[in-house]
């Protein structure tokens, strides 16, 4: 942990404002591009905003002398991730097998959209498993 | 876990932000500890004890039912 430098120009409040502000502008740009039929420009604004906001979010705590994040933030992220994984797992395990059984019995049809959602969740779980393995090796 | 961080901090005339700066965390973390909503890591507990020149047990004590 680094000591807080109260003279630092980048405060925690400014850091958060920058990240959320740029991220918000990126999303607005994407939506504006969609509405105004300027899809390429909207995508460009979104990508730029996402990369800049993401870069600041990750790099600023490493480079700044001010304490922008601390152990409580990591604890909050940890708890939120646990809750998210728990909810997704309970929903996934309870719903997905039932969906496939019902489809096999011709009671419903799993559409392309639902298939996409299932694949996305499966990929996320796989990625979570990989990240968990990496984290476990380091602790 | 219970603690007497608020009393110790106020005895020294420090704000939450000043104590946070001294031990390298955010003001929100000090506030959460004082309100018993967050248990600090061992590292931070040692830093706080070091700052107040006392032992960890003199600042923190487990709940009775723990």
Image: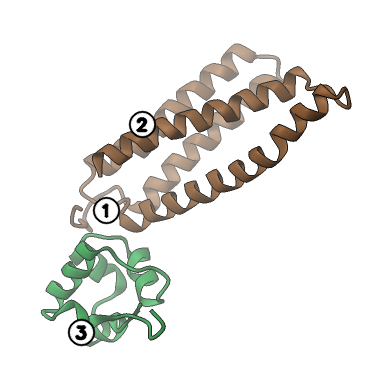
Chain colours: A brown, B green
Q: Are marks 3 and 2 in contact (CB under 8 Å)?
A: no
In whole angstroms, how far apart are the C-alphas of marks 3 and 2? 42 Å
Please tell me whether residue A98 is drawn above or below residue A119 in the rendered image. Answer: below
Residue A30: x percent and y percent? 61, 24
Name the residue at 28% across, 86% down. B7
Mark 2 belongs to which subunit? A
Query: Could you say whether the residue bearing mark 1 is in a helix, strand or loop?
Result: loop
Which numbered dot is residue B58? 3
Q: Circle 1 sits on which residue?
A: A67
Mark 3 belongs to which subunit? B
Mark 3, Cα crowd under 10 Å, few <14 / some 14-19 / many 20+, is: few
In whole angstroms, how far apart are the C-alphas of marks 1 and 2? 17 Å
Residue A23: x percent and y percent? 50, 35
List the single residue furthest toward the top: A40
Q: Are marks 1 and 2 in contact (CB under 8 Å)?
A: no
Q: Circle 2 sits on which residue?
A: A55
Name the residue at 30% across, 54% down. A70
Query: Could you say whether the residue bearing mark 3 is in a helix, strand or loop?
Result: helix
Please tell me whether residue A117 is drawn above or below residue B65 in the rendered image. Answer: above
Is any part of residue B13 visible from this angle?
no
Query: Where on the picture, by quarter, is residue B20?
Result: bottom left
């Amino acid at each position: 942990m680094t000591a807080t430098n109260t003279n630092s120009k980048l405060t925690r409040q400014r850091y958060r404002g920058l990240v959320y502000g740029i991220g918000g502008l990126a999303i607005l740009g994407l939506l504006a591009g969609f509405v105004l039929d300027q899809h390429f420009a909207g995508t460009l604004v979104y990508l730029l905003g996402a990369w800049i906001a993401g870069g600041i979010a990750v790099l600023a705590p490493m480079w700044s002398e001010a304490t922008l994040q601390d152990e409580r933030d990591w604890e909050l992220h940890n708890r939120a991730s646990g809750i998210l994984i728990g909810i997704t797992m309970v929903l996934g395990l309870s719903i997905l097998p039932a969906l496939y059984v019902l489809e096999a019995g011709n009671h419903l049809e799993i559409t392309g959209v639902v298939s996409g959602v299932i694949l996305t969740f499966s990929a996320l779980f796989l990625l979570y498993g990989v990240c968990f393995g990496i984290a476990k090796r380091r602790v | 876990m219970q603690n007497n961080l608020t009393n110790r901090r106020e005895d020294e005339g420090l704000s939450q932000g000043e104590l946070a700066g001294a031990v390298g965390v955010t003001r929100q973390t000090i506030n959460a500890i004082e309100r018993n909503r967050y248990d600090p890591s061992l590292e931070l507990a040692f830093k706080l004890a070091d700052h107040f020149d006392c032992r960890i047990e003199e600042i923190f004590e487990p709940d009775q039912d723990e």
